[in-house]
Amino acid sequence: LDHPVEAAPLALLDSTSLDFKDLAKADIVHPGRVGEIYEVTHNPRHHWIYYPEMTPEEGLVIRGYDSHAADGVSFTPHTAFHDPRTPDRARPRRSIEFRAMAFAPLNG
């Protein structure tokens, strides 16, 4: 991570604009096992937010699962995408993803 993102910026879907009917289940195939993820189908009501030119000093926390989600959606759809304004000789996007879990007390 030694330069700002020039190609394939990250976009997050505002989960308040998502309806569960907009989701389609899809297999994700790993060596030795098959998992399942959701793919998002197009809906003109979706509100996407994207982060162009993120720097190595910037980061995002993305909700992977929330059992008590106030908006009824327990995760945040996200993707990288082709931005038509990408310069011809843009360096490829480099990124790191890691996952963490946080637990709240049962009586909290």
Image (tube, grey):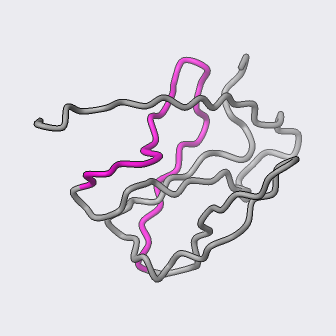
Percent across and percent down for residue 69 are: 27, 54
* Residue shown at the point (42%, 44%) measured from the top left: 63
Apparent side of residue 55 relative to residue 6 in the rendered image (left or right): left
Magenta stretch prevailing secondary structure: loop
Magenta stretch holds residue 90: no
Residue 72 percent across, percent down from the top left: 28, 64
Identify whether 12 is placed above or below 5: below
Q: Which residues are magenta?
A: 45-69
Direction from residue 60 to residue 80 in the image, left or right: right
Eyeballing the image, is 51 above or below 95? Answer: below
Residue that appears at 11% across and 35% down: 108
**Residue drawn at (61%, 35%), measured in percent from left and top?**
53
x then y, percent, for residue 91? 83, 33
- The answer to which quarter of the image holds residue 18 is bottom left
| The magenta stretch spans residue 57 | yes
Q: Give residue 14's position: percent from left, percent from top.
A: 39, 59
Residue 106 or 82: which is nearer the viewer?
Answer: 106
